[in-house]
Amino acid sequence: MATATATKPQRTPQEVEDIIIRKIFLVSITGESTTTTGATDSRIVYLELTAAEILSEGKDLLLSRDVMERVLIDRLSGDFTVTGVESSTFHYLVGCYNRAHDESKKIVNMKDKNLRSEIETVIKQAKKLCVSYCRIHLANPELFSGARDSNFSASGTGAGASRSPLLPLIISECGGGGGMGVFGGETRIAGVKSPPGFLDEFFRDSDFETLDKILKGLYEELRGSVMKVSVLGNFQDSLRVLLFLVRLPIGAKSLVSHEWWIPKGVYMNGRAIEMTSILGPFFHVSALPDQNFFKSSPDIGQQCFSDASTRRPADLLSSFTTIKTVMNTLYDGLSEALRILLKSTDTRENVLEYLAEVINLNASRAQMQVDPITSASSGMFVSLSAVMLRLCEPFLDANLTKRDKIDAKYVHHSNRLNLSGLTALHASSEEVAEWLKSKNPATAVDINQYNDGGKRLQESQEASSSGSNNASPKYSFICECFFMTARVLNLGLLKAFSDYKHLAQDISRSEDTLSTLKTMQEQSPSPQLALDITRLEKELELYSQEKLCYEAQILRDNTLIQNALSFYRLMIVWLVGLVGGFKMPLPNPCPMEFSTMPEHFVEDALELLIFASRIPKALDGVVLDEFMNFIIMFMGSPDFIKNPYLRAKMVEVLNNWMPRRSGSSATSTLFEGHQLSLQYLVRNLLKLYVDIEFTGSHTQFYDKFNIRHNIAELLEYLWNVPSHRSAWRQIAKEEEKGVYLNFLNFLINDSIYLLDESLNKILELKELEAEMSNTAEWERRPVQERQERTRLFHSQENIIRIDMKLANEDVSMLAFTTEQITAPFLLPEMVDRVASMLNYFLLQLVGPQRKSLSLKDPEKYEFRPKHLLKQIVHVYVHLARGDTNSIFPSAISKDGRSYNDQLFSSAADVLRRIGEDGRIIQEFIQLGAKAKVAASEAMEAEDTLGEIPDEFLDPIQYTLMKDPVILPSSRITVDRPVIQRHLLSDSSDPFNRSHLTADMLIPDVELKAKIEEFIRSQEMKKHGESINIQSSKATIQTTDTSEMLID
């Protein structure tokens, strides 16, 4: 018996198409809400009107590609009740695209190739429609949303507007979404991912205008999402989205055409462009603290570094590492975004304009005091510094092969970057304007316009944009990037170094004040003192947190420091190229190309070297030879670098490189095996020691001691290097009447001032000590007076400590140099001054007042009287050994203020007690005896001369002139050694302040002859009187004898 086999009816192509479309769009035109498997799906919507239209057209109730768009519009326009993820228009469309993708995978196994091809076409059309209507919806959210998306706006900036639903898809595509919620709860739809291919298709094959509105809204949301986010907040998702978008040509174009790419406005300033531009808030992400109104969260100082003194070192190290790592993620992302934009000729100019605008609007960050309301944050500019250094990497190769692409004319002719108002290395603004005029007479530069950088920039840009023939030339990207980076580093990384240094100083001062307050509280407690102590402890805690934030983001980031060093190596090599390369002597005159370069180019390089030298391992592997050459070449060259403080900073760099301080043997080769160093270093240090006397600053008197302290430390080190000592001796011989004599004069001046000042302060300190030790009397004084006197006591302690340290250095230098160099000290214009100085020191240390200088703890104040006495006696002995003409004893005895022959025997007694070498003591005693004889002879000579006519007396010293000279301007006659001694410190006529140099002195031959005749006549007269006296004595004696005989 045959049985019938049930077979599944074969679906027609039209039916398959209908099923696929219904599954993709979750719609029905038959009223059924079941799937093809018979299961009920609440998401399926019955399109009653669509069904009626199809029937009215006399067609079967089947969906086809012809009605697909009508179906989608009806589904989107209808007021259907749908719950769940796809209740919103956008997520419904994304769901449709996802289902279409799933269906495309299912039909792969269809046996009927023709049918499969047809269905593939349907699915592609469905996908295209989904993407197209996603664009339409995002650009015009009110079109289909009805009640479901009423609070979503295209720009995402309206009141109550939610974030763009496109963002989570992009984040998931970029592998993000794992951090803290930055975009808010409504954008984080659980399980929503971008369907494969959706975003590619979304941003492809569309006109710019359609996508531009969507993209601009996305950029605004990204900007808002990282606003006031610190480095520990979730900025990474936003950064990934930014990178995703700028990699799309249409995304890059939309970004740079956004009105907030470079915001404009009458009140636009540095802070405004940071907060309102699209990229500004990304650069603001930082670990560095900001002004309270702009403060980011979470608070890095509070979260990572509160109560740091009680935290385990491992915890602090972990915080440092985390911050450094995350900041580098930010730097890498932002530099990649800019790199992408710069590679395209369509967007490069926009990027350069943005960077220039940020730099120009923040020029005030170079000032000592920065207004946080009108200037961008340090965080932004440190981040921008790191990013710009990454952009420079292609031309920072070891051989600096692309430095010829850097055009010096950019400084004066760039229409983009305002560099015109910056202080130049040597040229004044008038000289710069005149030079530019001579280079191009057709475009004469008005000096006021040159000084008004903003006006000049605006006019130049207008000329350029109008197609003027005078528009500045095009500069290469390398050139533009180089100068922009130099400016950014000046306003960013280098400014942060300065802020960190001042912060450390504030901490040090506050700690000293706190220590003083606690001491006062122990001695005489008061509620006000307790409040002051509590307040100061809170301030110190905040200071400490801030300092550690700087350390985390900057000091611990060796990559950042090394990149900056590489950049400034290029800067130094390029600048030297403007004067003909690394060779001496320098050209004469200084090339204007070099003279007109901004001073901060050099200053920033030096500051970085100083800072890096103090960070462990920061200089490891860094080639320092070019820096060393540069310093040696320009340290003693005021005709190339006018600012003496800038040249003094070079000494500070070298001080940090001294092997005993750097802790690295590598730096010793810079001093001991370096040709330029051996030839010029000592000479230029001596020149700078002299130059720094007159800086033009109102603080020059105090500044010179700190600068000379650095020079003295370096000179002491070099004296112990045989090759440098030989060079030193040669300079002393060649420049005996030149720079070396000036050096000695200022060394002696400083020694006298510092020792005198510190000894007087010791006496004042002892008076204060006596006041405070008298407890009964001290307690009766008002609290405020006690506090003031205690502060004065601590202040005096600091002054004595500093002055004594500097005085010790100067006397030490006199001691070790006089052992081998004596001739300059014994010159007529110098020997009396040297002798007076030594006598004064001797009087203070072994004279009647010495006991009043005793201190409880002299080491605390760097006061070592025994060692000081030894060094002074060594100077005496060294000079006596070199005194071949025996003029030194006479100079010692001529000192009417301090000389006393008893001081030599008193000093000898002290030297014996402290164990000084017997030979030194013996030579010192012999010198004292010679001085005593010279004093006796001088008294006899004075007696011989008698009353000296006024015309023979020097008008300054009132001593008998030996070599009278006429001053050319005032026509006054003075003694040559006296005026030469004056000229060592002041190159002017002491009577009318006109310019005067030693070679301008006019010998007064006639007066000299008169003086010599006067001396001869007085000596003959004295000799005659002596003979007469002797004759008279003989007569008297004869008379007496004869009388006796007579008797």
Image (cartoon, rainbow, N blue to C red):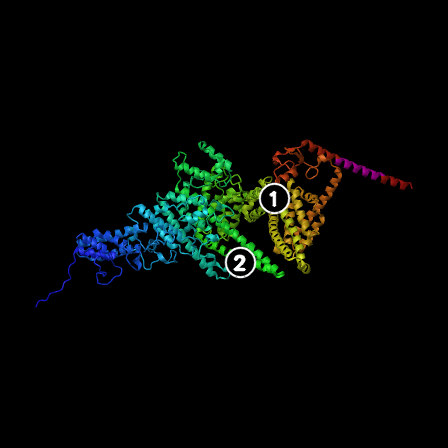
Which is the main secondary structure of the residues drawn in magenta?
Answer: helix
Q: Quadrant of residue 531?
A: bottom right
- Disc 1 and disc 2: Cα gap in Å? 46 Å
Q: Quickly name the residue at label 2.
A: 538
Mark 1 vs mark 2: give the one in front: 2
Residue stretch in magenta: 1018-1035
The one of 266 and 507 positioned closer to us in this rendering = 266
Residue 675 visible at all: no
Q: Position of residue 891 (x, y in %)?
A: 68, 43
Q: Residue reaching furthest right?
A: 1047
Task: Tell me the kind of residue under disc 2.
Answer: Lys
Task: Tell me the kind of residue under disc 1.
Answer: Phe
Q: Position of residue 242 (x, y in %)?
A: 36, 51
Magenta highlight on residue 1024: yes
Q: Quickly name the residue at label 1.
A: 746
Q: Tag 1's secondary structure?
A: helix
